[in-house]
Image (spheres, rainbow, N blue to C red):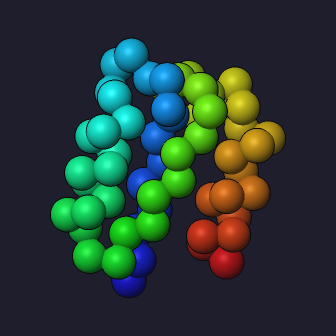
Amino acid sequence: MCELVLAGDDDPMIPSVNARVMARLIPDAQLHLYRGGHLALVTEAHELAPVVHAFVD
């Protein structure tokens, strides 16, 4: 099973380096860095939903 790690490249709460480390430590993880910060998962859902949909599909 593959895991998806989503992270913003400008997140002051959780720096993207954490996502890079997490993706390296999880076998077969797929990393997707998006432009934006922590709330982009909500405010930019229209851009990130296709990424999640493609991963799940």
For residue 15, above or below residue 1: above
Indicate the position of residue 42 as horizontal and vertical percent values. 64, 29
Indicate the position of residue 12 as horizontal and vertical percent values. 39, 16
Indicate the position of residue 16 as horizontal and vertical percent values. 38, 36
For residue 26, above or below residue 10: below
Residue at position x 75%, y 57% in the image: 50
Q: Looking at the picture, tell me which residue is in the foreground, 15 or 53.
A: 15
Q: Is residue 17 left or right of residue 39?
A: left
Indicate the position of residue 3 as horizontal and vertical percent values. 40, 68
For residue 16, above or below residue 13: below
**Residue 27: quadrant of the picture:** bottom left
**Residue 17: quadrant of the picture:** top left
Residue at position x 46%, y 41% in the image: 7
Q: For the N terminus, which image quadrant? A: bottom left
Outermost residue toward the bottom in this view: 1
Q: For the C terminus, which image quadrant? A: bottom right
Residue at position x 45%, y 66% in the image: 30
Residue at position x 69%, y 69% in the image: 54
Q: How many marks?
A: 0
Q: Is residue 37 left or right of residue 12?
A: right
Outermost residue toward the right in this view: 46
Q: Looking at the picture, tell me which residue is in the foreground, 44 or 15.
A: 15
For residue 55, above or below residue 46: below
Outermost residue toward the left in this view: 25
